Amino acid sequence: MKLAIYFYIKALFSFTICLISSSVVFYIFSLIGNLEEKLSFSSILIVSFLDTLLILSYIPSFIILLSIIILIIFLRSKNELMIFKEYLSYT
């Protein structure tokens, strides 16, 4: 049971990292694209944030795929992936 909880914590951690990093990248590019608009800067910040949420809602498969890749990298870094394979082969 502890192994499953550990796996869920690692998966949630990788999903959070992926979501935050993707949001930052999309926000920066949206901000650059919206800077040529003739709006106040606070309005541009709000519009860029809403654009970021819109982009993230369009591509959830990208977020899930990237978080799985990050999870595998985290598990391989400490050879935890082999522990999970051995545990699953016994069950």
Image (spheres, rainbow, N blue to C red):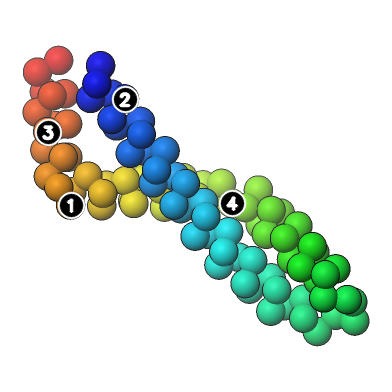
Q: Earlier in the sequence, mark 4 or mark 3?
A: 4
For label 1, the residue is 77
Q: Earlier in the sequence, mark 3 or mark 2?
A: 2
Q: Is the residue under label 2 in contact with that under label 3 (CB below 8 Å)?
A: no
Task: Mark 2: give few (<14), some (14-19) or many (20+) Cα within 10 Å.
Answer: few
- Give the number of the disc on residue 89: none
Q: Is residue 72 left or right of residue 81?
A: right
Q: Is the residue under label 1 in contact with that under label 2 (CB below 8 Å)?
A: no
Q: Earlier in the sequence, mark 4 or mark 1?
A: 4
Please report the residue visible at 39 percent of the width from the left and 46 percent of the height from the top: 14
| Type of the residue with mark 4 | Ile
Please report the residue visible at 62 percent of the width from the left and 72 percent of the height from the top: 28
For label 4, the residue is 59
Confirm whether residue 74 shows in the render. Answer: yes
Residue 89, percent from left and from top = 11, 23
Quote the CA–CA distance across marks 1 and 3: 12 Å
Quote the CA–CA distance across marks 4 and 3: 32 Å
Q: Earlier in the sequence, mark 4 or mark 2?
A: 2
Quote the CA–CA distance across marks 4 and 1: 28 Å
For label 3, the residue is 83
Residue 64, percent from left and from top = 46, 45
Residue furthest to the front in view is: 42
Q: Secondary structure at mark 4?
A: loop
- Give the number of the disc on residue 5: 2
Q: Secondary structure at mark 3?
A: helix
